[in-house]
Image (cartoon, coloured by chain):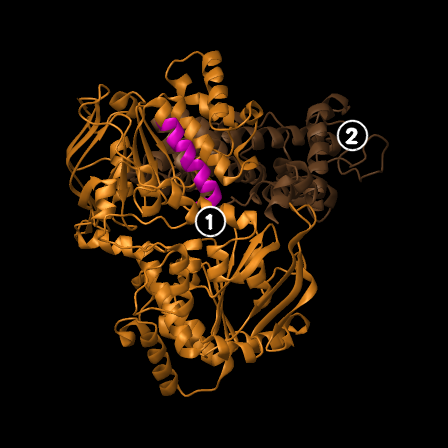
Chain colours: A brown, B orange
Amino acid sequence: MTTMKTNQSFWQRFCHNKAAVLGLAVMAAVAVLAIFGPLMAGNDPWDMVQQPFLHPMQEAGFALGTDTMGRDILAGVIHGARVSLLIGLVSTLVSLLIGVTLGAVSGYFGGWIDAALMRFTEIFQSVPSFALALVLVAIFEPSILSIVVAIAIVSWPPVARLVRSEFLTLRQRDFVAAAQLAGQSTLRIIVTQILPNAMSPIVVMASLMVATAILLESSLSFLGLGDPNHMSWGYMVGSARTVLRQAWWMAVFPGVAILLTVLALNMVGEGLNDALNTRLRRKGR
Amino acid sequence: MTDNAKQDTAPVLDIRGLSIRLPEGGDRALAVTEASLTLHAGQTLCVVGESGSGKSMIANAVMGLLPRPHVEPVAGEILLDGQNLLTLGEPELRRLRGQQIAMIFQEPMTALNPVMRIGEQLAEVFDAHLNLGAAEKRQRIVAALADVGLPEPELIYDSFPFRLSGGQRQRVMIACAMILQPRLLIADEPTTALDVTTQAQILALIRDLQRKRGMAVLFITHDFGVVSEIADQVVVMQTGQVVEAGPAASVLGAPQHPYTRKLLAAIPGGEVRQPQADAANPEYHRVLQVQDLCKTYRTGGSLFRRGREVPAARNINLELLRGQTLGLVGESGSGKSTLGRCITGLAPFDSGRIVFNGRNLPQGGSLMQRSGGKIQMVFQDPYASLNPRHRIGAAIASGPIAQGVPRAEAMARTLSLLALVGLGPEAAERYPHEFSGGQRQRIGIARALAMQPELLVADEPVSALDVSVQAQVLELFATVREEFKLAMVFITHDLRVAAQMCDQIAVMQRGEVVEYGDTARVLGDPQHAYTRKLIDAIPKLSREAQPAQDTPDVAHQAERHGEVWAPGAEAYAPPAPAMAARAGGYA
C-alpha cells in the first residue's frame, strides 16, 4: 500500500487536497497583484484623489471607495499586497536562516552545545513574541527593514526546535556514519546528507510562517508601527477603526485581503504537509 | 500429538482455495493465490516463505485483521471447526478472537502497552470474554504467567513492560494468547526478533504448551531451522502460491519443488572456513590489533545522582591479519556492535589501544586523520544506511571525491564497483527506494569498497535479509575479500553465518571475549559454557536425536539426514544434504 502512495508524484499528492489547490490559486493571484498591480493601479495610495467617505462603486474608477482623507482604497489594497508579501517572505527567510543554523548545530553536535543553544532559544520563547516584536520595532525606527528583523527575531525559535529534533534522529542513521567514514567534512554532512532529509517539515513550517509574519506585520501597522512610507493592509484597517460604524468598507476590504492571503497560505501549508510528509519511511520488511 | 488421534478428528483449521486481493498498483494482483491448508488439533503447521510471499496475509486473514477494503479475500473459505470465518461479521469474530483463536506477534517490544501493568493487560482478555471476580481473575492470570515459565509471576503481574526483557515479553504475549485456552494459536514470526538462545527457549515453550493443551499451532516463519524444530506439517509459499506442502520430515528431507530446494540450500552453516593466512605466508601482515580495549556506557546520570554503568567492552584483545576474517558473535547487548564502532572510530573508547597497520589510532579527531578512510563499514539495516535523497552513483562516488580523487575517476570506479556487486551501470542514476534490501546491501558494500579499504567492519550485514538473498550477499563478501585481500571484522549473532565466513571467532558475553580462536576449534570444541549454550541454541535441520525430546517424526528426520549435531565432537554438522558434500571432511 505504501508503494502505491510513494509512486505518486509530489504534485499528484498535493492536488489530492482540493483546498490546497484553491489556496495556491489565491496565492498566485495575490502574487501577481503584488508584482504587477502597482504598475496598473492608477492612483498613488497616499494621494488624496477624491472626496473622502466615497462609497464603493459610487464613482467610476473608485471601485472600493475612498477613506477618511479621500485616498483610493483599491490602490491601497494593491500596494499593501506588495508590502505584506515582501515582509512575509523576507522575514521567513531570515528566521529560517537563524533557526535552521542553530537547530542543525544543536542537533548534530548535541552535548553542551545543544544544551547552551536550547537554553538560548528558550529565552526567546519565554517572551511573548508579539510584545517583543513591538518593543524591537519601537526601539528602531519603524521601517521595512526593522519590521523584517523584528519578525525574524521572534519567529525563529520554533524552527530551531523542529530542525534540532529532526537532526537528532537523522544523525543516528547509518548513512551519516558512512559519510563520516568516507571522510566527508562535518559541514558537508550537515548540508548534503542530513538537511535534505529534514526539508519536508521545514518547507511546511515555512509556508505557515509566511502567514504568521503577514499577520504580525498587519498587527504592527494596525498599532501605527508600520513603515510610514509604504501603504499596508494593517495600517488601513487601523486608520479605519475610528470610523468603523460610518464607513465599513475602509476596514473590510484590507481586512478581507489579510484574511484571504493568510487562509490561502495555511491551505497551501496543509497541502504541502499532505504531499511531503506521507512519505512513510519504509522500514524493514 | 499421536498420529492416529489426529486422523479421525475433523481439522481445527481448514483453508480452502483462499485468494487475497492486493490494491491496484501493487506488485501483483493477488497477495495469496488459492492457498489451501489443513491443520489438526495438537499439530503445528509451519508456513514458510521469504518476505512478500504472502505468509503473514494468511495469518491476518484467519484473524480477520486484513486492512479491508484495500486488501480482502476474494475467493475461498477459512473454516475454523467447520465455521467459515470469512462470512462472519465483526461481533462474531470478536467473540472468537482470544477465545478460539489467539495470535502472537513478531515484535514483543511493541506488542505490549508500555503504560499498562502486565496484569491489567492480561485481565483485558477476561473482561472481553468472561465475567470473573477480581480475585479469581488475578489467580488465573498469575497461574498463566507461571505456566509460561516466568519467574515470580506475582511480581510480574504488577510490573510495567519496560522491566521485562524481549524474551520475557514474548512469554507474556504467549500467556495472554493462551489464557482462554484457544483451539488455534497463530504465531507470526514470534522468535525472529529474539536472540538465538531466547529463541530456543520460546520454541521449547510453545512446543511444550501445545503438547499439554492439544492446541493447533499455525506458525509463520522464514527460517527453516525453526521449521525443523517445531513443525509437523510444512507449507512452503512463493509469491502468494503454495508450492509445496506435506509432513515436515518429507519436505525438509526430500524437497520436491525447486524453490524449497533453493531455500534449504541457502541456509548458511554448511562449511567451516579454513584459516587463510599463517605466519609462513609471505602476505603475513597484521592489519588490526586491539589491546586491552575498555568502554563503558554511562546513562541517566545527573548532578545529584550516579548514572547506571554498562560495560560494553572489557579488556578486549584481538588481532587480525590481511585477508583474514574475524567473527564477533554473541547475543544482543554483548557489546559486539560497540566494539565494531570503536574499531571504525565511530564510537570513542575509554582505555586501551587500537593499532591499525602498525599505527596507533588516536582518540577523537576526524576519522580521516585516524585511518585515512582505510577502515570502512557495512551496516545492518540496508534501509537506513543509504541516504534516501542521494542517487546511488553519487553516494558511492562521494567518498573518493572527498578523498581528492578526480570526479571522472571516482565515477569510473563507482561503475566498476557496481558491476562487481552485480548491479548494472543504470543503477548509478537511481535512488535507494528503487532497490530491494539485498540490492541495497550490495550498494553498501560497493560504497565501502570505493574507499579502497584495508579493513572492513561488517555489522550484522545479512541479518535483515531473506535467507536466499543472505546467501548471495555472503558469497559477495567472500568474493570481494579474496579480490581485495581485505581484512574483515564480521559481527553476527548467527553462528551458522560466522562458521561459513570467519577464520577466527571471538565469542562475546557482557562486554568480554569469553572464547577466542580458530573457527573450527571454537565451534567444534567449545571450551566456555556460554559458547556451548549458543551452539546448542541454533535451530538446526538435523536435530540431535536425544531420547528425552524424542518424537517419532523427529527421530525419523534425523535418521533421514544421517547427521547428528553433536556439540563437543570435532564436527560442525552440516544441516542440509547439499552442504554435506561440500563439508565432507567435517561431517
Q: Which mark is residue A50?
A: 2
**Residue B481 lies in what quarter of the image?**
top left
Q: CA distance from mark 2 to mark 1?
A: 92 Å
Magenta span: B463-481
Any magenta on residue B215?
no
Neighbor class of circle 2 (other Cα within 10 Å; few <14, some 14-19, many 20+) is some
Residue B134, image x and y in percent?
Answer: 38, 85
Can residue A220 be seen from the camera position used here?
Answer: no
Is A12 placed above or below B301 here?
Answer: above
Q: Amino acid at mark 2?
A: Gln
Residue A172, image x and y in percent?
Answer: 37, 39
**SS majority, magenta:** helix
Question: Looking at the image, which is closer to me, B92 or B303?
Answer: B92
Is B177 placed above or below B449 here?
Answer: below
Can residue A261 be seen from the camera position used here?
Answer: yes
Question: Looking at the image, which is closer to me, A285 or B1?
Answer: B1
Q: In the rendered picture of this protein, how many numbered marks are placed on residues?
A: 2
Q: In the image, is B351 to the left or to the right of B539?
A: left
Q: Nearer the viewer, mark 2 or mark 1?
A: 1
| Chain to which mark 2 belongs | A
**Residue A10 lies in what quarter of the image?**
top right
Residue A34, image x and y in percent?
Answer: 68, 28
As helix, strand or loop, the secondary structure at mark 2 comes to loop
Q: In the image, is A126 to the left or to the right of A14?
A: left
Q: Which mark is residue B264?
A: 1
Question: Looking at the image, which is closer to me, B68 or A61?
Answer: B68
